[in-house]
Image (cartoon, rainbow, N blue to C red):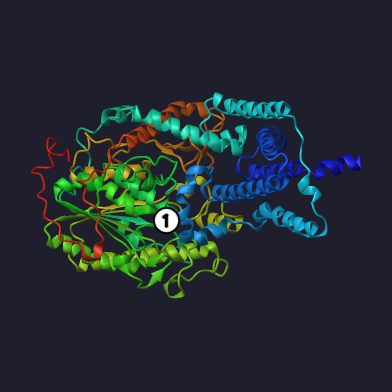
Amino acid sequence: MLPVLRKYLYQPGILFLAVLWCKIAYARSIIVGGSLWQSFYIELPLLIAGVAIIEAIFQGKPRLRFWSYMVINLVVSLALFAMIVYFRYFNTLATYTSLFNANQVGDVGGTVAMLIKPVYYLMFIDLPVVLGIVAVKGLLRKPLRFIQNGWRMRTRYGAALILACLILAVVHVLQAIGGGTINEIVKARDMGILTYQAYAVYSDVKKQLVAKSQEVTPRAVRQAKGIRLADDPFMHGVAMDKDVYVIQLESFNDFLIGLEVDGQEVTPVLNELIGSSIYFNRFYQQIGKGNTSDAEFVANTSLYPTGTMAMSLQTAGRKVPSLPRYLKPYGYESVTLHTNEVKFWDRHQMYPALGFDRYYDKQYFGEEDVVHFGASDEVLYRKSLDVFREIRERGNRIYANLITMSNHNPFDLPEEKRRLKLPAHLEGTFLGNYLQSAHYADYALGTWIEEMKAAGLWEDALVVIYGDHFGVNVNEPPEVTKPLAELLGIPEYTRAQMFNVPLIIRVPGMDEGLVRHNMGGQIDILPTIMNLLGISYEDKVVFGQDLLNHDRNLIGQRTYLPGGSFINEEVIFVPGSGLEDGVMYPLEDAEMELPSPTAYSQDYSKALKLLRMSDAYIASLPALGEDAVPVDAPADAPAAAPVDAPANHGSSEARGG
């Protein structure tokens, strides 16, 4: 028995199979779950086929065969390691498209490091061990028996083995997609996490071909949503001709609003602002793989992220309908301001696509008072005023996006910016740092409001403030989520709190605050702004809806939740293999009696249809064209010529934009 066992242990192919299967089984246990038996019969066929191919190609070439196994082992180990870390952050499966965002890792290295557990490095432990054994044994005995050995298969038997394994892998794929499964986690579980990578390529190509053949119209979108535009819209035109400032708060959860720690308000500025603004307390993030940059994209376009890559890359070189383009005929000059390098998340490609007149990045804000990746929020706000004054001097109205950054994970603010006095159990913790950082972001916003008032710009300012995405992930360890739940006075921190970000709209002349409880998402920002400005979007392809004139809503989700997920007025819905085995998370009452998943069959179908239509519309967008105005470097930006506003833009005939 021992000689037979030793014979097989000396086969590099056998060892490769065993080691790689163990790694895949471990990755599956974290990412997709399922039993060990599933891992065995689903993942092994493709591995066996791969080993058989290598043995056939390198028969008689033992050293090439051995090093092929080592290289493949390294590549797969790196891929599995990345997939585990990616899943821990996004709660979705990484595919080949995730490589397009690999250049961003260096900028968010601190966040990535927090996701890595030491045990994950065991994924690579076999590599130095094997190389060490080979080095030592190679010095003592040549040729090395381990390297020399290999399977001697006749061609016909080898071909039959490879074919049988590949057929079995295809069967797993067909079974996984045969029932109409949308959830990519379930798909990967049922077809294999490596097989799914190949399937993802095929699926994305197919979706692109289908999308390009589909025509999307404004009427078709409204029909798919099941809504009609209001005949006499509430608050229509109340901010007509006003300057528009959209402020995107980095990593800002809604639970921060009104929260107190030892009697101290975490967001006193926002709390006061809500007293004379419209506050949407059931508003949810809808970002894609581009995180913060995708929030900018969604807010400015009312289109869904495709879920494959950052929209800055997805729409690079295309002409995207957007708020900057819709507002330009009405005399608005559009600028976007961010203290990091403009190439972070490839914004240098997104801003021309969205039609911004200019961007202001690190080149403009410099290295003063650096927090994380660039100048602090205080510097962002202070130096933005010079930009706004110049636009006013040119006789134009202002449309400005301010992208804050100081409240960025891992929230380690400089000591002088920590203004909260935290209790001992929160001091120096992740949660304590988050509260400190959010408090500073709120303080910095307060400085901007005061400076806007002093500059005479506040009176005519329509200010839209929203969170780009969560600051505290539901997947954080219990030492983070448990004290947070206690602070919030809830049994546990849920996905509902995680996805909930604030939306606050300050309308000039509004004295009393208005709290709206209807559900909304970032895709609804554009139509809500246009209603307040008195500009019609009836002839625009808009996937969101005016939050002031629709009581019910439905928004699709693609990131941080599996495909096919959506949020309606009652729950966050996450499909399983399909609708029937879906899981629901109540938005508010954790004790609510949940209906059967089939009760949401119409919402499920509607959400999937809207996502497909958005993909089709994005795929049909034209090239930017040579006549497009590039986004100039801001340092010496040329003066823009005044643009006359169309007459009577409050009327239905002239509001097209």
The image quadrant where one finds the N terminus is top right
Quadrant for residue 30, please give it: top right
In this rendered view, identify the residue nearer to me: 510 or 296. Answer: 296
From the viewer's perspective, is 465 left or right of 104? left
- Callout 1 secondary element: loop
From the viewer's perspective, is 163 left or right of 221? right
**Residue located farthest toward the bottom when viewing the structure as drawn:** 416
The x, y position of residue 457, in whole percent, is 19, 62
Judge whether 104 appears above or below 179 on screen: below
Residue type for callout 1: Phe
The x, y position of residue 96, in whole percent, is 51, 43
Is residue 507 visible in the rendered image? The answer is: yes
The x, y position of residue 365, in whole percent, is 31, 67
State the residue at coordinates (11%, 51%): 643
The x, y position of residue 72, in whole percent, is 63, 46
In this rendered view, identify the residue nearer to me: 358 or 58. Answer: 58
Q: Within 10 Å of the Cα at label 1, are there few (<14), some (14-19), or many (20+) other Cα atoms?
A: many
**Residue located farthest toward the top when viewing the structure as drawn:** 178
Judge whether 35 appears above or below 146 on screen: above
Residue matched to label 1: 252
In this rendered view, identify the residue nearer to me: 269 or 583. Answer: 583
State the residue at coordinates (38%, 32%): 610
Quadrant for residue 169, please give it: top right
**Residue located farthest toward the right when viewing the structure as drawn:** 1
